[in-house]
Amino acid sequence: MDTATIAVAMALAIIMIMAWRGIEVGIALITATAIIAATNPQKTPEIIVETIRSQATWTLTITSMLIAILAELYRNTGEIKKLGIGVAKTLKNPKLAAMITPAIIGLLPIAGGALMSAPIIESLTPTLNLDTETAVYTNVWFRHTIFLTYPLTSLMIAIAALTGASITEIAIQQIPTTIFMIIIGYIIALHGRKVDRETGNAGEGNIKAWETLKAATPLILSLTIAIPLKTMVSDNGMIIGVAMGVAAITLIAKVKPKEMMEAVKSERTIGITLASFSSMLLQQAFNLTGATQAITRAINSTGIPVEALQYIAPALLGLLTGSPLTGIVLSLPIIGGIKKLDTKTISAIYISSYTAYIASPIHLCYVYTARYFNCKLSKAYKLLAPSVIATITFTIILYTLT
């Protein structure tokens, strides 16, 4: 085992240990970056400079900060309670609201975007009697059910570009797994859970349809502005869209300057902003020191049969790097060098990397949601891990039999 591989193993172990102990994830990511950079010290200045120069760094960091501020304002002004009750009332089913809301907000394709639906799940927790770890699981899991079939995600576009496969064919191929994810999520988080109608109905008489729409306006603005701008112009459209959402809730809830400063300076906002920047720092360290290639070499040397490797390699890479795209990009040449990359094989790589990434301790949606609910990552793992394993197992069985 070479030095780079050992460093990667140490860095990932450090991240997991620090995350498990409740240490700020941004600090854990910086520590991991330092360990990886130590294998190629002369690259350290380049890692820092490239991170700072990268537009992606600032797009992610600023957008994540704005999302955190929007979530804090929703929470602190009470608008989120109106929205949560209104959505549940409109859907006539709080469980359905808990499943659908994160998925809809998942249309805002930004790292850590689950933070936007976290306040809504929080508002539904008394009605559904959710403990903190189940609330974290519900928000994270149901947000990500949409991305296996959503054609406008950058991940879907990237894998189609890399392989020449049809986005439509990939999306159709993955519909059964998407349905399974929804079913397994419901069974684990919501099945058999008694709905507290008294708590759920408390105050509903005072929540009118127009109040629900007004409370939803900042989120609607964020989505309807950010997604088209991101698609047609650039990633800066995400910043503009979420900024408009912050402006909207400021006007709607008549947020005072002091309240705005409280949201900006909150531990959650600072922690999420630091984690965003640190994740880009770690990504640069992986790319510039050769750590990514070290992981690829280690996987190639295992001699695992390709039928298993097409699931194991992308899942391991997605889990370890906290990036489904990294898992896919590194796995495609490994698998493609052994067998033809047909739609089913591409889908197997996609699903394995993506679902394993959901449970990664450096997955920002997971980190941010756990942070929002003041829940240790380890507590929600007992729900996330079985869901990921069950989903990949279902896909293996399905693709083997069909």
Image (cartoon, grey):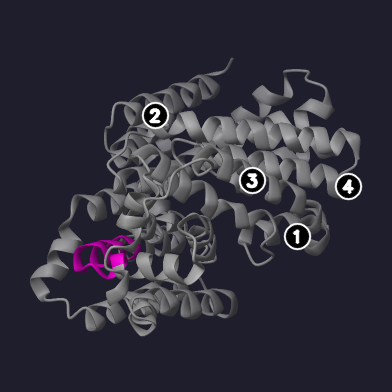
Mark 2 or mark 1: which is in front?
A: 2
**Label 1 crowd (10 A; few <14 / some 14-19 / many >=20):** few
Q: Nearer the viewer, residue 375 or 25?
A: 375
Report the amino acid beneath label 1: Ala
| Magenta residue check for 69 | yes
Badge number at residue 342: 4
Q: CA distance from mark 3 to mark 1?
A: 31 Å
For residue 2, what is the image quadrant? top right
Labels 3 and 2: the sequence-earlier one:
3
The magenta span reads 67-81
| Magenta residue check for 255 | no
**Label 4 crowd (10 A; few <14 / some 14-19 / many >=20):** few
Residue to which mark 2 is pinned: 378
Left or right? Give the position of 61 relative to 309: left
Q: Nearer the viewer, residue 296 or 210?
A: 210
Asked if residue 297 is positioned above or below residue 342 in the image, the reply reads: above
Mark 3 or mark 2: which is in front?
A: 3
Q: Position of residue 69 (x, y in %)?
A: 27, 64
